[in-house]
Amino acid sequence: MPCFIRKLTPDGIVPVDYSADSLADAAQYEPDNGIYTVTNTYQVTKVLKLGAHLDRMEDSARRAGFELELDRPRLRTALCEMILQANYGDVRFRVTVTADKPDTFIISLEPFSPPSQKLIEEGVHCITAPNSARHSAEMKATSWMHDRKRLADAMPAGIYDTFLLDADGNMMEGLGANFYAILSGTLHTAGTGVLKGIAQQIVLEVAPDILPIQMDAIHVSQIGQLEESFLTSSSRGIIPVVAIDGILIGAGVPGPLTRQLIAAYRAWVDAHLEAL
């Protein structure tokens, strides 16, 4: 199915002058001087932590140098109307706003299916990219949508994501995900120099009942010592990582603590869904 794209303007919802096959394809038409957020729906028109997504959009706009005060009820109403009109069922959607038109929103929808149970049970293989950590990573800017395409296009077959390393070799984040490592029974994830993910907020809420947390990045040289690893994003939840740069993590299968975190994360989601 094609991507369903509209603009929400002060005068209402209007068509755009381009078409795209997916959110990734549609990104090429969106300006570099904007900010955005991406998430998905559940049960067609239910959402998770949409308020946190919109808070981060306003924060990203300030970091980008322009003021943004979202009319949240109007945006929610427009999203609901578009989702029902598209008739895709559950959708993954992106909301984008640019510095030169802060009262106009580009809303893009595509059909959404959650990660397969097979992928969760088997985990994924990832790689690292030296000296690739983002500048102003705390800002979710449209320029990053374009910059990361180069890294995504360079991933070999069978690789799920690329983890960005800073100049010192610290493992910061994925192309669109937060990165986590379990070392000596403690959960490590970068606390600064990365985008503070919405899924990360949930992990940090449920994890203390399972294991201790340290908000620091591990070094790439520690990959071989890791007991478990995973990544998170709003649309995917927790995805176990079983190998990085060809080095197996633990036994090369999702570990027991990761599985506990997945169960706790899913329970939190089920308890906190809200209607648009």
Image (cartoon, rainbow, N blue to C red):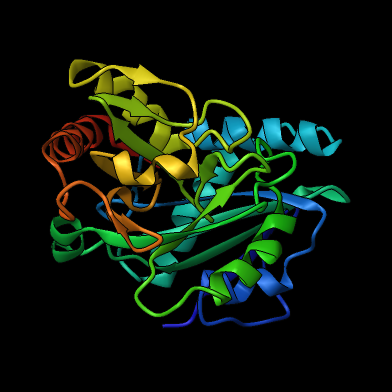
The quadrant in which residue 90 appears is: bottom left
Instruction: Note whether 184 is above or below 276 in the view shown.
Output: above
Q: Name the residue located 20 percent from the left edge and 34 percent from the top edge.
A: 261
In this rendering, the count of numbered labels is 0
Of residue 85 and residue 132, the one placed in the foreground of this image is 132
Q: Name the residue located 56 percent from the left edge and 64 percent from the top edge.
A: 108
Of residue 275 and residue 90, the one placed in the foreground of this image is 90
Residue 240 horizontal/vertical position (percent): 25, 50
Instruction: Note whether 166 is above or below 204 in the view shown.
Output: below
Of residue 54 and residue 235, the one placed in the foreground of this image is 235
Q: Quadrant of the C terminus?
A: top left
Residue 70 in sight from this viewpoint: no
The quadrant in which residue 158 appears is: bottom left
Relative horizontal placement of residue 44, taking residue 93 as reference (left or right): left
Residue 136 in sight from this viewpoint: yes
Residue 162 horizontal/vertical position (percent): 49, 59
Q: Quadrant of the N terminus?
A: bottom left
Instruction: Note whether 60 is above or below 38 in the view shown.
Output: above
Q: Name the residue located 48 percent from the left edge and 44 percent from the top edge.
A: 220
Of residue 27 and residue 197, the one placed in the foreground of this image is 197
Q: Name the residue located 19 percent from the left edge and 39 percent from the top edge.
A: 258
Relative horizontal placement of residue 199, taking residue 134 as reference (left or right): left
Instruction: Note whether 91 is above or below 154 in the view shown.
Output: above
Relative horizontal placement of residue 176, taking residue 234 as reference (left or right): right
Residue 247 horizontal/vertical position (percent): 32, 57
Residue 33 horizontal/vertical position (percent): 82, 54
